[in-house]
Amino acid sequence: MPLRIPTDACSFCDYLAGRRRFTILDRNELVAMLVTREQRGVGHVLVVPVQHRPSILDLCDGESAALMDGVRRASAALAGCHDPDGIAVWQNNGTPAHQTVPHVHFHVAGTLPEGGTRWGPVPALDLAETDRIADALRPHLPPA
């Protein structure tokens, strides 16, 4: 039985195609790293496949490996830039698992000083602020 995936238009595909402005930290032919406007930790990056894939079950082998490498690289950038006590990585598939964008993505965030990450509503940053976050992370991003 297929997963119940959100039916909204895919905002990630719009960002990656340049139809809507969003902060892209890094990108190659398989994977992109986006600085989310909803910062739930000390630095919060989304690692997404460039091709539209609704869930983790839709990935091809090359994309799976590239996504995990992207998660590792994003984690290293967050650790180098912010020196958090921990790094949280999470991923949801299907609306029952709280997936809200119909494009598979991994969240990578440095933990807050009190531990964990923010849940519930958080303020949306403007693009100038997410661009500043990306500029701070890039010097710490290991090569692909």
Image (tube, rainbow, N blue to C red):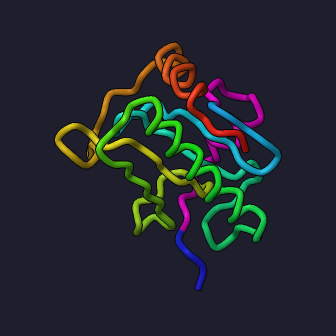
Q: Which quadrant of the figure has residue 120?
A: top left
Front position in the image: 132 or 16: 132
Q: Quadrant of the N terminus?
A: bottom right
39 lies above or below 94: above
Report the residue that reaches farthest toward the top. 128
Percent x, y of residue 142: 64, 39
Front position in the image: 4 or 118: 118
81 lies above or below 47: above
At x 68% / y 65%, what residue is drawn? Answer: 64
Q: Quadrant of the C terminus?
A: top right
Percent x, y of residue 17: 77, 35
- Magenta span main SS: loop
Q: Which quadrant of the figure has residue 39?
A: top left
At x 73% / y 29%, what residue is drawn? Answer: 19
Horizontal placement of 75 versus 104: left or right? Answer: left
Percent x, y of residue 105: 57, 53
Q: Was residue 143 drawn as part of the magenta stretch in this picture?
A: no
44 lies above or below 51: above
Report the residue that reaches farthest toward the right. 29
Q: Which residues are magenta?
A: 5-24
At x 62% / y 54%, what residue is drawn? Answer: 103
Q: Was residue 9 drawn as part of the magenta stretch in this picture?
A: yes
Horizontal placement of 117 versus 28: left or right? Answer: left
